[in-house]
Image (cartoon, rainbow, N blue to C red):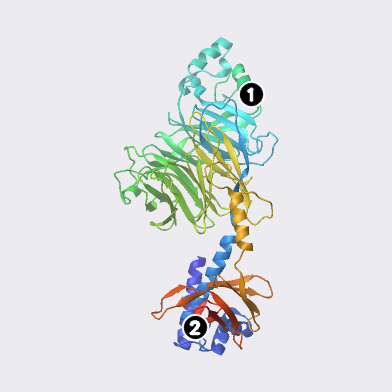
Amino acid sequence: EDDDDLALCLHLVETLWQCRNREGLSCAEFSSLLANMLNRDERELQVLFQKMDADGDETLSWNEYVSYLCQQQRHLWRRQETKNVAYFRETDSEVYAWDDMKHMVSKLCMVGGELSAKMSLHSSKYAMLTADNLVQIRNAKTLQLESSLDLSLRPNRRRSQQRNEAECESLSEHASMMKSAHVTQCTDVCHSLSNRLALSFMDRCVNVYAPTFTAPIDLQPIYLQSTLDRKRFKNEIHYVVEHSFYSLDIPQCLSVLDASHFLVGDIYGNLAMYNYLDQNCRIRRNKHSYASSASSSSSSSVSDTLCPMKQVKSVPRIGIVSCGMDRTIVVTDPNKWHTTRTLSGHTRGVHCIDFSLNHRILVSGGYDRRVIVWDPYVCKPLGFLSAQQHHDLVNVVINQQDNQIVIASVDKKIQVFDIRTWKCLQTMRDALTHSPVNALSCIAYDEQQSCLLSVGSKLRKWYIQNSGSNQDSNVVDSNGDGDVDVDSHIQQQQQQASSMAGIVCICYSSIFQQVISVHIDAMCVVWDVQSGQNSFEFKLCDRDRDDTYKAHSPITTAAIDDIGKRLLVATQNGTVQLWNFNNGALMHQWSV
């Protein structure tokens, strides 16, 4: 909406501009026109007119006006890029390794709550699903084990309904009931509301578990634990089945829609909404299919062809976004449940997506090792991140607080990109040795602690360090593989800011109250006297006879004209140039 309003305002100003004078506005016409529209003092606009008048003919054309606005916006954009840049400090990262962890973590879910080291039901936690079908729930601040859930001991649902745990009169009968437990693989884990956990299984069962300090007698735990098992896992918090329902097909991904509904993507590419309170499926549509096109995917038919949906999320003001093995990303209207947009750009299946509502972009990663940036309202990609991945991607995470896009691959390589410029800010490598596979399995970003979590069989926290801080840093290659960590990035930026090229001349403009510094490397910097800030800068260049530009010759001297509006520059090759230093326009060039 803001972009549309800006375009409308520019179109209105251009229309008024053309009505006044097609060739250009005089200083009086310009100041009176904008003074009425912007409610600003005419004297300020008169000074602004002198800055915008690139050719110095005392008339301001529409092209000169737009060119000045673009140059100023470009300068402000560059300043913003270098000002609000954050990095991860490798030297300050924390490593957590557990003796009892013998398998890789396949899923990591953050359970929201208050950040406290004290064990409570409402504290922030990490739920980690391991390859051996075990869920470890740890405190988010201390990573102390609070509960460990062995999903391989999940009871057979039919037999557990026939016989309640309260009917078990002896340990032998309880042991015989344990034999009826069947092993089924957990497919996904997500955080439900009120500190609940939701898990989906290959037998189409979806369970919602509630934490409690004392396991009630009339309710079965998540796993049929005996007294010995409880002592073995040293559980301080118990999880009991609060709600349960069966999905129509094998679930592959879960997401919370509201207080009573779940979004479930199954193995056939169908998207369904379930009410877990009454165990009913409200609506179900096919969104991903190898054979279907974008038009047929919006139909109400349900597919019976295998095309697993890999991830589904509900995004405010955009809709329900899902990705699957059919190489597409589908945006679904949450009210009418029809497909609003289908984003195509990957050459293989898409397995991870993330969003930034502040920047209105979507980032996706696929099995083709490509990371694509999307506008969720446009079907074509905005661009591709130059991640240069030689191994499969693990996940793509957006850190909105610090304007970062984080990409991780299985070879323990983590790349950090600026979300505004798509430039690679930092490359890190996890030096930990994971077992049984020496690779990363998942990453996540904890907004409460402002840290990145990278997990294999061990967990590592990477903390944010803003480049504008005054903390001391040392250049350390902690990995020994040639990749320099964030300390070197910060030191290089500080050296670049302090080691600006030597100054040839300094001039002062009384009409604009600006100081102009001309440097040996042909850089011209304009400083505001009142604030002391760099208000504008541009690179000097030479113009040939065929109106082509090339690198500038070494500068010998510079001066301001008598009026104080233009900059004269002399070079070693006998060239004198006249510049408008407020918009970087070369007005005249003479050869001596």
Q: Secondary structure at mark 1?
A: loop
The answer for how far apart the CA atoms under marks 1 and 2 are is: 79 Å
Residue 47 appears anywhere in the view: yes
Taking the image as shown, residue 298 lies to the left or right of residue 282, namely left
Compared with 181, 237 (above or below) is: below
Which residue is depicted at the point 56% across and 53% down? 400
Residue 516 appears anywhere in the view: no
Q: Residue 472 at x, y = what percent?
A: 68, 51
Q: Residue 35 at x, y = what percent?
A: 59, 83
Front disc: 1 or 2: 2
Which tag, 1 or 2, sits closer to the chain's start? 1
Taking the image as shown, residue 378 lies to the left or right of residue 419, namely left
Residue 566 marker: none
Instruction: Kindly identify which residue carries mark 2.
Output: 587
Residue 234 marker: 1
Give the quadrant of residue 251: top left
